[in-house]
Image: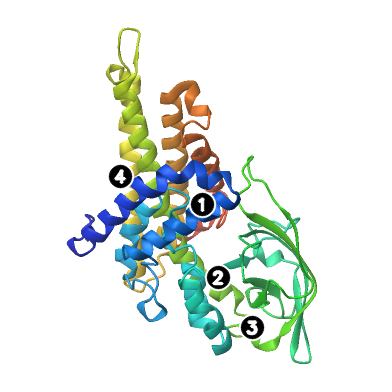
Amino acid sequence: MRFEVPDRVRAVRDEVHEFMTTRVEPAEPELTAGGPAAAAKLGSLRAEAKAAGLWALGHPAELGGGGLPFLDYVYVNEVQGRSEWGQLALGTFTLQDSLMLHKHGRARWREKYLEPMVAGEVSPSFAMTEPGVAGSDPTGLRTTATLDGDHWVIRGRKWFTTGAAQAAYTTVMCRTEPDSAPVHQRFSMIIVPTDTPGYRIVRETPVLGIDGGHYEVSYDDVRVPAENLLGPRGHGFVIAQERLGPGRIFHCMRWLGQAQRAYELMCARLKSRSAFGEPLADKQLMQQHVFESYAAIHSARLMTLAAAGRIDAGEQARVEIAVIKVAGARMLHDVIDRAIQVHGAEGLTDDTPLSRMYRHAREARLYDGPDEVHIQSTARRLLRDA
């Protein structure tokens, strides 16, 4: 396998890189501040992305997207990941949900949501995690859905439902089958429009001091039609795994974009700042930060592309995906941490993007499964096959 950016995708990747560095990154302070001005700025960026032919590049062409093949989009996703606003500005935030709905949703919901979602006119949300339940073991989820005639009645509470306040619907993982069913066949996914009676946002949960749009939602006897079931009954975990495998690849590529940006900021700082009579770039311990960061980024990139290649070939690549999820999250944290160290006190402030990047990097070791679970399950597979 070759790891350099293929010629067929280089041009669009370069265009996305330029859009990120000249349009999105300079707008981050305004976007982060929130409010009407931020919404207007994001709308302007989206319009520019559409006009430039950079909108929804990873979505299937038949849904109105750019139709980039999976592996081509992986390369683009890295440079898009330089900013947390990249997905929203370029219309790819909805990719996992649109693919899931396209494959498993009933015709009514595909007609209602798919094209508007890809166009950026509506947004989805996804609810699995619950307060008071170990997120590392989703078989313990307690939210239930009971079939009452031709309606599901949903009762429970979810949190970390990203974007729920703006979403048109939430895909909810519910316990629908009896305890006599195999443990991984007790759960189903159900589409719940967010204007359904009983769907109540409890709060936005701040994460490490950031209001990141993660919501706690209560489901108080929420009634939705039986046809809102996504895929067959009891297939919630099957659909979740379909969603999470490629999703983790996308996460890792975006982490590489964040790490590369932190690396560039670190190098620029070292070359522009002097201490004790000479440039910081001449200090050997500072040079070690550069070396360790470059090596970590390059290693993680190669591992991620290798895993993506196996997914693209139709393999599950469970070991490879678990390894890059853990290694990629560590790499992201460590590179940003070194960049902050090089910036000194300024690195702790919000005068650079590093402080916010660092807090988001800490999240990476928990979402889509904590590192410990991936390490344990992967080690078991490796020992079994040894």
Tell me which label, 3 or 2, sits earlier in the chain.
2
Please tell me whether residue 199 is drawn above or below residue 382 in the rendered image: below
* SS category of the residue bearing label 2: loop
Query: Nearer the observer, disc 2 or disc 1?
Result: 2
On residue 298, which mark appears?
4
Q: Are marks 4 and 3 in contact (CB under 8 Å)?
A: no
Q: Are marks 2 and 4 in contact (CB under 8 Å)?
A: no
Q: Can you tell which quarter of the image residue 167 is in? A: bottom right
**Residue shown at the point (34%, 68%) measured from the top left:** 70
On residue 170, which mark appears?
none
Q: CA distance from mark 4 to mark 3?
A: 42 Å
Q: Can you tell which quarter of the image residue 227 is in? A: bottom right
Residue on which the image places disc 3: 229
Tell me which label, 4 or 1, sits earlier in the chain.
4
Find residue 217 and report its horizontal and vertical position in percent. Answer: 73, 62
Tell me which label, 1 or 3, sits earlier in the chain.
3
Residue on which the image places disc 2: 122
Residue that sits furthest to the right in the current view = 221
Q: CA distance from mark 4 to mark 1?
A: 21 Å
